[in-house]
Image (tube, rainbow, N blue to C red):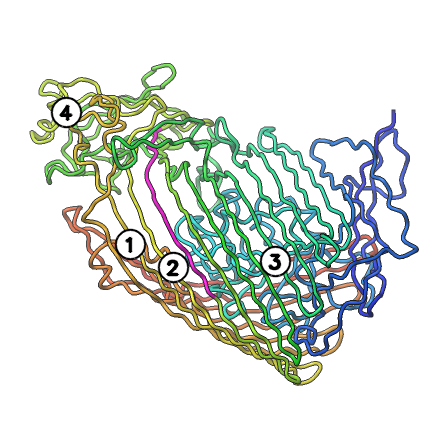
């Protein structure tokens, strides 16, 4: 029996400079692999992609007065017609077996889907064209399309060839191939951390992991708003529609992109081809202990009518259990569909584009390790263990005992995005060019997830405060104390008691205390005591509904005047923000591979059973229960249902103006400079909550289910009418940069750039207006980012190398501490703290072709950061 052959053939199609020149195939077909029983082919590999060379480019319109053409050819989207010598298209194999772990790429027709940028006219490249291009024209980090070797900024382009070969954990992970960029995707597909050149002070956690950079799709930010646990990573997904990624770190990003002095990363989509065709990719793999991962990508494009329009449509679907999966549901499950309709009408181009995304993702909480100098995982748990909620669903009171919502752990973080936009570019003649890109978006990030997972010992008083097992209110004799009695922790399925702890109610919980004489572990039979004695995982069910309506618009006007190129324009961003947070409950689970929440029962103290030292006030507060057992958890093991209330709504408006000037002093020497001013204004309110007044361990109140002896649903948080704070604040920032570029010859070029940028606070700052003191005294202030870089490029037929030494300084790193008075209740606000960091480093990117089919590529970064000024507040 013969087995069908699976093969992959890739071509890099480039159009030579002369009108009507034949498209050259610069990258030859890769080998193909033959399975037993199949005819032996000439070349071998393990996946398949068909492409059809032999097209001829129709003559593009020529407009010598275009400033864009002065530095780069404009989009070439005229129909590509097959030459008479074009060989007939071969039919793909009738049957292709899908093998486990293999990637199948099947070209349905022409794969030449044109991207936002077009490579320059050049002699035929070496046979093994590189996947990471250092010599294309770029549009990111510059005001006008510029040849990479003449660009005065550190930029890397990841091409379609390279992207198709990657199995990245997330869209952020693609940037690992860019020197100087730090990427941490260890949490999963969302909540990634991306920063460059040590500019990282406010990006060290998944909640704010992209604070200093701009993540873009087709030239506009994916979202213009960022705050704790909301940023572009929730909506950025790479798939087969992606043509290239342009990555700019530092330097010019501060003046060419919105509020992003640390870098700009532009994910550019394919546009429609002149001939119908597309691509299918399928992936199957195993993760962790053999958990399945399924994914399918599709992109298809074709001409649309006979007026020069073409469309591209594609996306992906993915279902992945994960390598450390929770019990009962996948870590990632969802899809994206996106597309565009494009026309080049000679004097310009018009593109309508859109996207629809619906994806559910969770993230991996931290593993337990010992010895920070040589971290290793504790024995007793494996690298496949989880500490996330298992599959479960329950109702909880949301701000009222009559308004119930559902907490479903399988929803995880559901990120949805819908947008539509128009990108128009027009050449008026006499050197004038207009660019206008506008996008209308609606984003949702709806959370039903684990958060704050931490092992805590039953000996620690803060275990009980974390579980919201303490009095809230009732005066100094009660507030913050653990109600007296016996707390019993049992397996929900078998009823076996695993631990018992008694409290005499004589102490106020201190978050840092590792013990208290009034808290005694009477019994503990818990697993993995060698990790932490008498410990349980504590886990909080985060509920958040973050809904954003956005408008983003960029308008630029360019004038080419002799050797000078001037660009001026503006940027406008609008966001209607609604953020509403609650709590799905809290759980305590053993330190096991797949933990299940325990049932917690409280047996109130009585005169006869009160532990030694029980104060009369706390004993009187629980006397109404009569010593009858009270179940603190619901059937799924969750307590403190609905505890947390945060609500903020705002209108955020961002206005920016920019100007850039490039002067080609000679064919090999250019100067450029520019500036950007921004104003970020936010008008809204923050609303805090307070515990339901009847939920303070009241034996006469039954909560949502009406039963005082099932207390999981009694202690929810309600809106506090006295804690609603309205604000109307703004912050202004100004950035400028200047550079020069010298092309010594076809092999050597270098540039020098200085940038003085400012990073305005994002929306998270304005959510801190939660007191009269802060409204009166807290002022938004931009951070400053100064950078100096020297870029050197060396290119030969066999090697391409860029070396970029840099110096960066991040200052005005703001911290707004908050503390409480000795009573543990009254807040006070110390003066803000401003810190500074400095980083020296060198970035290296290079490709060396050792033979026709052998090449070595390296990305290398070395940095030396220091805390130039770093102070912390100690209460």
Q: Earlier in the sequence, mark 2 or mark 3?
A: 3
Would you call the spot at circle 4 few (<14 residues within 10 Å), some (14-19), or many (20 or more)? some
User: What is the number of the mark on residue 652?
Assistant: 2
Residue at the disc numbered 3: 178
Residue at the disc numbered 1: 685
Image coordinates of residue 412 in percent, x first then y, are 45, 36
Q: Nearer the viewer, mark 2 or mark 4?
A: 2
Would you call the spot at circle 2 few (<14 residues within 10 Å), some (14-19), or many (20 or more)? many
Residue at the disc numbered 4: 700
Q: Nearer the viewer, mark 4 or mark 3?
A: 4
Mark 1 vs mark 3, CA separation in Å: 40 Å
Q: Do the residues labelled 2 and 4 touch (CB within 8 Å)?
A: no
Image coordinates of residue 426 in percent, x first then y, are 63, 70
Which residue of the protein is positioned furthest toward the right in this rendering?
Answer: 85
Q: In which quarter of the image is the N terminus?
A: top right
Give the secondary structure at mark 1. strand
């Amino acid at each position: 029996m013969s087995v069908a052959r699976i093969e992959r053939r890739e071509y890099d199609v480039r159009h030579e400079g002369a009108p009507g020149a034949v498209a050259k195939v610069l990258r030859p077909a890769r080998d193909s692999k033959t399975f037993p029983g199949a005819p032996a082919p000439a070349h071998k590999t393990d996946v398949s992609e068909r492409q059809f060379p032999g097209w001829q480019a129709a003559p593009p319109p020529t407009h010598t007065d275009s400033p864009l053409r002065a530095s780069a050819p404009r989009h070439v989207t005229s129909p590509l017609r097959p030459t008479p010598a074009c060989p007939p298209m071969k039919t793909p194999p009738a049957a292709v077996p899908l093998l486990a772990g293999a990637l199948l790429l099947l070209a349905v027709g022409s794969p030449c889907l044109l991207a936002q940028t077009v490579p320059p006219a050049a002699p035929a490249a070496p046979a093994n064209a590189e996947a990471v291009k250092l010599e294309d024209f770029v549009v990111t980090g510059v005001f006008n399309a510029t040849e990479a070797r003449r660009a005065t900024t550190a930029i890397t382009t990841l091409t379609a060839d390279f992207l198709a070969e990657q199995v990245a954990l997330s869209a952020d992970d693609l940037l690992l191939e860019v020197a100087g960029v730090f990427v941490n995707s260890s949490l999963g597909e969302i909540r990634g951390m991306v920063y460059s050149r040590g500019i990282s002070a406010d990006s060290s956690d998944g909640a704010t992991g992209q604070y200093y950079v701009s993540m873009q799709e087709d030239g506009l930010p994916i979202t213009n708003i960022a705050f704790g646990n909301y940023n572009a990573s929730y909506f950025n997904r790479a798939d087969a529609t992606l043509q290239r990624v342009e990555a700019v770190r530092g330097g010019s990003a501060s003046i060419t992109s919105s509020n992003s002095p640390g870098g700009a990363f532009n994910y550019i989509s394919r546009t429609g081809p002149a001939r119908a065709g597309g691509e299918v990719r399928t992936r199957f793999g195993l993760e962790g202990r053999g958990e399945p991962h399924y994914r399918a990508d599709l992109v298809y494009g074709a001409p649309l009518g006979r007026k020069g329009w073409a469309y591209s449509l594609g996306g992906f679907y993915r279902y992945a259990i994960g390598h450390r999966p929770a019990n009962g549901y996948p870590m990632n499950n969802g899809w994206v569909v996106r597309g565009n309709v494009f026309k080049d009408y000679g004097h310009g181009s018009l593109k309508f584009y859109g996207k629809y995304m619906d994806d559910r993702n969770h993230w991996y909480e931290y593993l337990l390790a010992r010895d920070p100098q040589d971290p290793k995982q504790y024995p007793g748990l494996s690298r496949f263990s989880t500490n996330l909620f298992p599959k479960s669903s329950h109702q909880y009171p949301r701000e009222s005992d009559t308004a119930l919502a559902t907490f479903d752990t399988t929803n995880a973080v559901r990120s949805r995005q819908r947008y539509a936009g128009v990108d128009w570019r027009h050449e008026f003649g006499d050197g004038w060019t207009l660019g206008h890109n506008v996008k209308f978006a609606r984003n949702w990030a709806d959370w039903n997830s684990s958060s704050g997972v931490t092992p805590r010992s039953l000996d620690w008083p803060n275990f009980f405060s974390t579980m919201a097992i303490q009095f809230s209110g009732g005066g100094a004799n009660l507030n913050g104390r653990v109600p007296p009695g016996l707390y019993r922790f049992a397996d929900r399925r078998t009823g076996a008691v695993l631990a018992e702890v008694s409290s005499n109610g004589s102490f106020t919980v201190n978050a840092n205390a590792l013990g208290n004489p009034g808290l005694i572990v009477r019994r503990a039979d818990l697993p993995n005591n060698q990790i932490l004695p008498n410990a349980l995982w504590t886990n909080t069910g985060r509920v958040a509904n973050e809904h954003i309506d956005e408008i983003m618009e960029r308008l630029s006007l360019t004038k080419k005047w002799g050797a000078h190129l001037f660009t001026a324009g503006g940027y406008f961003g609008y966001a209607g923000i609604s953020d509403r947070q609650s709590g799905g409950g809290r759980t305590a689970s053993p330190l096991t591979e797949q933990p299940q929440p325990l049932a917690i029962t409280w047996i109130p103290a009585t005169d006869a059973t009160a532990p030694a030292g029980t104060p009369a006030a706390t004993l009187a507060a629980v006397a109404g229960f009569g010593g009858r057992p009270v179940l603190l958890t619901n059937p799924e093991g969750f307590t403190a249902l609905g505890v947390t209330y945060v609500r903020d709504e705002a209108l955020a408006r961002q206005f920016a103006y920019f100007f850039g000037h490039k002067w080609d002093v000679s064919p090999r020497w250019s100067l450029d400079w520019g500036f950007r001013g921004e104003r970020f204004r936010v008008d809204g309110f923050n609303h805090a909550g307070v515990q339901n007044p009847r939920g303070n361990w009241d034996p006469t109140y039954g909560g949502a289910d009406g039963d005082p002896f099932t207390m999981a649903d009694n202690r929810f948080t309600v809106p506090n009418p006295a804690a609603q704070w309205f604000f109307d604040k703004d912050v202004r920032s100004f950035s400028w940069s200047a550079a020069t570029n010298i092309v010594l010859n076809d092999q050597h070029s270098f540039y020098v750039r200085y940038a003085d940028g400012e990073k305005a606070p994002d929306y998270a700052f304005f959510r801190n207006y939660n007191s009269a003191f802060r409204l009166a005294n807290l002022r938004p202030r931009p951070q400053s980012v100064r950078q100096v870089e020297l870029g050197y490029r060396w290119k030969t037929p066999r090697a391409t190398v860029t070396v970029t030494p840099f110096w960066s300084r991040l200052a005005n790193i703001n911290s707004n501490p908050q503390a409480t008075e000795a009573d543990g209740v009254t807040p006070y606000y110390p003066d803000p703290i401003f810190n500074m960091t400095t980083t020296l480093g060198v970035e290296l990117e290079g490709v060396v072709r050792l033979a026709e089919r052998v090449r070595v590529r390296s990305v290398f970064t070395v940095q030396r950061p220091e805390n130039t000024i770093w102070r912390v507040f100690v209460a």
